[in-house]
Image (cartoon, rainbow, N blue to C red):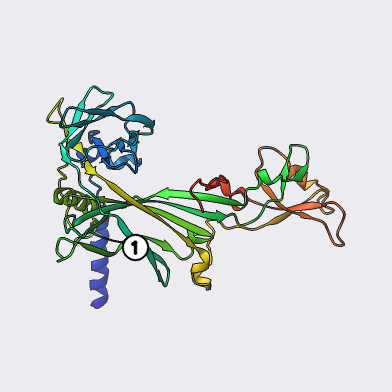
Amino acid sequence: MKGRYLVLAGIIISLMVNCTKPYTPSVITKAPSYLVVEGVINTGSNDSTVIRLSRTVPLTAGAGITPEQGAIITIQSDNNQTYALHDAGNGIYMSDDLNLDNTHKYRLNINTSDGKNYVSDYLASVSTPPIDSIGFTIKSNGLQIYANTHDPNNNTHYYRWDYTETWQFHSKYFSYYISNGTDMVPRDPSQFIYQCWGNSISNDIILGSSAKLTQDVIYQNPITFIQSTSEKIETRYSILLKQYALSAAGYNYFEQLRQNTEELGGIFDPQPTQLTGNVHCTTDATIPAIGYVTAGTIQQKRIYIDNSELPKTDAWLTAYPYNCGQDTALYYNPKTKLNEVAEFLIPLPPALLATQGWFGNPPAMNPIGYLYSDPECVDCTLRGTVVKPSFWK
């Protein structure tokens, strides 16, 4: 009897699964393309104003950021002064170091290439307190980087951070030889592709608030986590952290945005909410714009973390992003009668890269062949640059 119930239950579940059809509403597949505005009007003197413009895309598009090209953006003050931003490409618009008067209010004026005009609300400049320190704690599986700050005047309470991280790393194998199209020759030091620098920018919304505390202090606010096996901490890592003070309205906007983008998916997660920003289309009031522009000073701080500061255990060994191994190519393979060097390593552009010379046993005066591997395991420039950053210490 019990077996029959199990069979019947299986049939019911099968029918339920087979009768399920995906439902994709037209609002998802045919979503309009709204303007997205991101950035801070920097009223200080330590950085330029950077504004990013992009467009929303349907959930089914499978695309990342769609930059808004060819816009004209100015900063307008409440005393009728204007400051132009130049188009830096890829939807990025930048100003010079303006050092604006923080006793005035400012807004963005945006004219897009489709003839629409958008403006932000006028914004009072918010003074951002300095970053006290950036530190890290060692966890069992990586580094937790955090920030400390405080406002002795007890006026700020709401904070946002973003960052740029840079790291020094190297490829799995050192390449001592290179093809000149005719034969293999030793690499000149200017042709070395073993040590590089990589970089990335933050994508998460990082917020902190002291509004419920008696003192305006932020202690060890999490910034980012780096896995113990990451290439980022293989040699030396640096993070440039930027800190922004927010109004309560700005903080609430970014908190809703964070919940909508990072905490959805489960039945107990926050439900999506409509975001009401401070950018408006003056050409057509029915067209919404996405984004919340802030104005104020920006504080920043950089730290370095050396690999020597980290644990020396197997759990902290770098895991290369590729399955790397080496093989041997001979000028003359006695078994196959082939010149493997000519076939595998000399043709340009190279599909494989030589690492070391193979001198035989007993050793010959000149290489009788070469060890080689895939470019991903030899050429660090596929993931970074050999040019040392100007700020690197």
253 up-or-down from 316: above or below: above
Label 1, residues with CA under 10 Å away: few <14, some 14-19, many ≥20 = some
Circle 1 sits on which residue? Answer: 146
Which residue is located at x 15 percent, y 36 percent?
122
Which residue is located at x 32 percent, y 41 percent?
45
Where is residue 318? Give x, y as percent. Answer: 53, 63
What residue occupies the far left of the structure in this picture?
Answer: 285
- The residue closer to the viewer here, 140 or 387, is 387
Which residue is located at x 16 percent, y 49 percent?
247
- The residue closer to the viewer here, 15 or 362, is 362
- The residue closer to the viewer here, 147 or 327, is 147
* Left or right of 23, for residue 383: right
Q: Quadrant of residue 142?
A: bottom left
What residue occupies the far bottom of the structure in this picture?
Answer: 1
Q: Quadrant of residue 269?
A: bottom left
Where is residue 238? Give x, y as percent. Answer: 45, 56
Q: Is residue 125 visible?
A: yes
Which residue is located at x 43 percent, y 63 percent?
227
| Amino acid at the residue labelled 1 | Tyr
Where is residue 18? Give x, y as percent. Answer: 27, 54
46 up-or-down from 258: above or below: above
- Which part of the image, by quadrant, shows the N terminus? bottom left
* Left or right of 217, for residue 334: right
Q: Is residue 278 visible?
A: no
Where is residue 46? Give x, y as percent. Answer: 34, 44
278 up-or-down from 331: above or below: above
Mark 1, secondary structure of its residue: strand
